[in-house]
Structure formats: C-alpha cells, structure tokens
Amino acid sequence: MKKIRHLFNWILLLGSTLMVCLILGVILYDIFSKGMSSVSWHFITRFPTNGMTKGGILPAMIGTLLLTFITTIFSVPFGIACAVYLNEYARPSVLTNIIRASIRNLAGIPSIIYGLFGLALFVQSLRLGTSVLSAGLTLGLLSLPYIITTTEEALKRIPNSMREATLALGATQFETIKDVVLPKALPGILTGVILTMSRAAGETAPILFTGVAFYINGISASPNQEFMALPYHLYMLSTQHQSIEEVRPLAYGTATVLILLVFVLNIVAFYIRFKHRTKD
C-alpha cells in the first residue's frame, strides 16, 4: 500500500510538472514563432517610425537597461544590508518578527500600488518629476522585499559552526560576516537578486505613473527625463495602438526581445553563480 501511494504521489508530481512545462512551452512557441520573423539587427538598432508601425525598438531597449540599472543600484545594497542586519545582528524579539512579517506582506502588494506610491513620493513630494530616476526608485522599492527575503534565507543556510569557528580565531563579527558568511551565501544571494531584477525589468504598472512614455524622439540618457521601456512599449502596441493588427508583428517581436534579454541576463548571472560555487 505504501509503495502504491508513493508511486501515485510521484506520478502526480511528475504530471503537474509536465503540464506546467507544456503550457510554458506552448506560450513560448507562440511568441517565438510569430516574433522571430520581426527580430533583426535593423529592428534592434533603429528608432520607431511612421507612427510606431515601422522601425525598431532601440530607445525602449536602452530605457529598459537604464531602468534596471537604477533599480539594481538602489535596491541591492539596501536589501542585502537589511537582510544581514536581521539575520546576523538583530536579536529575536517581537519587533524583528513584526519587521519580517511586514517585509513578506510588502512582497505580496500589487505592483500598481507601488506605482501610485512612487508617484506620490518621488514624482510629487521629492519633485523628481516623471523620469527614469523616479521609475527606477519605484521599482527599487518593489524589489526590496524579495531581495531581503531571499538574502536572509541564503544567510540562514550557512551553519553557525562556521561563524563560531571564525570568532574563536579572533575575528570580529563584521569580519566574520564579510569574509566568511557573505562569500558562502553569495550563490543564493545572486539567484534572488537576478530573479528579482528579471521581474522588475518586465513590470509595467509601477513605471506607468512615474516616467515611461509611449514615444520619445531620441534616447533618454539623462535620469531626469522620461523614457521608453520594452514592457510598456509592448503593452501599447498590443492594446492601445490605433492600428493594432498592423503592428502585431512588432508587438510579438518586442515580446521576443524582452524574453531573450531577461533570459540572457539570467544565463550570465547563473554562470557567475556556478563559477563561484566551483571555486568554493
């Protein structure tokens, strides 16, 4: 009876996994089969023309990369520092439990709420205006709970015996964290950071109110200007354009480029993670 139950559970898990992979495969096949014909060097390196019905997506690509860079610069150091404090310095108490619960609740808030909060805080209160800086800071706030949670989980996997051995040799707590704990936890931290940045690169709602534009004549290199981004560009081409059927191939091409961009970033990050594990 126990073997039959074990076999049933294994078949159930395998079937669920295959079903998810099948659905994902169908979605990716639909996007790539319809989008790869539009992707070319001309499509990637040219500006949109003729009312966004022709040309390329260069401004949207550069805007997405700049937005992700600002988000990373803002969220990663603060997120890791907060996780280190909660796991290594803060003593167990009601306050720390409330802080952890609040962080996990913030991770479940819809992204549109972060967009409205970013509009009120960065655009209006701090008077940064609708810009890539305001959008990047908003996405940074959205990313913080995920980075804190994944970093803290990576730190918890490091055995306390390693910390105790280092402290017994005369190292300070800060030196122990810097030279032993963080290097050992780096693979897990990198994984959480990359997955979070991949999600941030594909967000539309938070940047909708804080700086993204449908079309800009040129490339926004300044953090104080409005910008184009691939997710919003895709949204506009798919739902709001006056000639949706005409630009549908461009929309599929934009979706293909966005998926490939996120995929390449993940591959690079996982390679760095694998290389670090190999050295260890």
Image (cartoon, grey):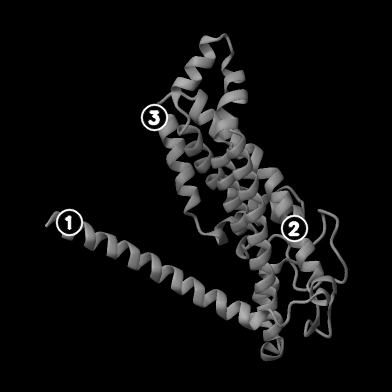
How packed mark 3 is, by other alpha carbons closer than 10 Å (few <14, some 14-19, many 20 or more), is few
Instruction: Classify residue 67 by image quadrant.
Output: bottom right
**Above or below for 180 versus 79:** above
Frontmost of labels 2 and 3 is 2
How packed mark 2 is, by other alpha carbons closer than 10 Å (few <14, some 14-19, many 20 or more), is some
Which quadrant of the figure contains the C terminus? top right
Q: Which residue is mark 2?
A: 65
Residue at point 73%, 51% (across, down): 69
Frontmost of labels 3 and 1 is 1
Disc 3 is placed on an element classified as helix
Instruction: Classify residue 8 by image quadrant.
Output: bottom left
Residue at point 28%, 64% (across, down): 11
Disc 2 is placed on an element classified as helix
Label number found at residue 55: none
Label number found at residue 94: 3
Label number found at residue 3: 1
Of the image marks 1 and 2, the number of the one nearer the N terminus: 1
Task: Tell me: 229 left or right of 164.
Answer: right
Distance between mark 1 and mark 2 Cα atoms = 52 Å
Of the image marks 3 and 1, the number of the one nearer the N terminus: 1
Disc 2 marks a residue whose amino acid type is Leu
Of the image marks 2 and 3, the number of the one nearer the N terminus: 2
Is residue 120 something one can see in this rendering? no
Residue at point 45%, 69% (across, down): 21
Q: Depth check: 6 or 80 in front?
A: 6
Where is residue 51? Give x, y as percent: 80, 84
Distance between mark 2 and mark 3 Cα atoms = 40 Å
Distance between mark 3 and mark 1 Cα atoms = 45 Å
Where is residue 191? Give x, y as percent: 56, 47
Disc 3 marks a residue whose amino acid type is Val
How packed mark 1 is, by other alpha carbons closer than 10 Å (few <14, some 14-19, many 20 or more), is few
Instruction: Classify residue 23 by image quadrant.
Output: bottom left
